[in-house]
Each structure stands twice: as structure tokens, then as C-alpha cells.
Amino acid sequence: RISGMLSAPQKDVATVLSDFVDENTRLKNNLKQHRENKGLSQEELAILAGTTRQTIIAVEKGKFNPSAKLALLLTAALDVKFEDLFYF
């Protein structure tokens, strides 16, 4: 059904993305670098983003893939663009 709603260029992008991104793909991040640039501890960032220090540690180590909501909260807390913080 979805493929019928996509235009030809979008089908090409979807096909290309499916070759290297699937439901198990984890986002890589520059969270630690940006956090340290802002002079924040893991605890301080956790408070700003409404999560726990353990979650921040797990995201920084690539052990936890944040939800879209948490990813956006982290970008807001660090005042950076999503694409500057997360990548494949």
C-alpha cells in the first residue's frame, strides 16, 4: 500500500535506505562531544532532557538507541541540530 503512495524518486530513496538501514540499525552520535562542549555533566544533561544519567551513558556508548522524543529533547538541551548530533 505504501509503495503505491510514493512517487518514483521516493521509491528510489526508500530502496537505497533499505539496503543499509533496517529496524536493527542504531544511530551513532556525538552526544559526549557536544555535552562536554557545553560544559555539562551526564547528570546535568539528563535533568535537562528529562531522563536518567544511566540513559545518557547508554546513548553515549551506543548501547541504547534513543526514541525520537528523547533524541529531540537532547538536541534541544544541547542547542544543536539533529544531524549534528546523530548519524548512521
Image (cartoon, rainbow, N blue to C red):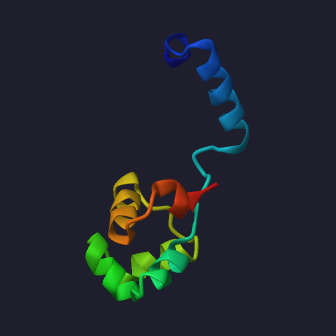
Residue shown at 27%/75% (left/top)? 48
**Please, is residue 50 above or below residue 8 in the view?**
below
Instruction: Residue 10 in the image: state x and y as whole percent.
Output: 59, 22
Relative to the observer, which residue lies in front, 53 or 77? 77
Give residue 27's quadrant in the image: bottom right
Residue 47: in sight, yes or no? yes
Task: Measuring from the top left, give residue 26's x and y in whole percent.
Answer: 59, 58
In percent of the image, x 41 and y 75: which residue is there? 55
60 relative to 17, above or below = below
Q: How many marks?
A: 0
Taking depth in this image into account, of 11 and 82 the one nearest to the observer is 82
Looking at the figure, which quarter contains the C terminus? bottom right
Q: Residue at x 73, y 37 (%)?
A: 19
Dividing the picture into quarters, in which one does residue 39 lie? bottom left
* Relative to 77, 59 lies left or right: right
Q: Please say whether residue 27 is visible from this viewpoint.
A: no
Coordinates of residue 34 in the picture (x, y in percent): 49, 75
Seen at 50% across and 18% down, the residue is: 2
Does 5 sit left or right of 22 as displayed? left
Classify residue 80 by image quadrant.
bottom left
Left or right of 16? Residue 31 is: left
Q: Residue furthest top?
A: 4
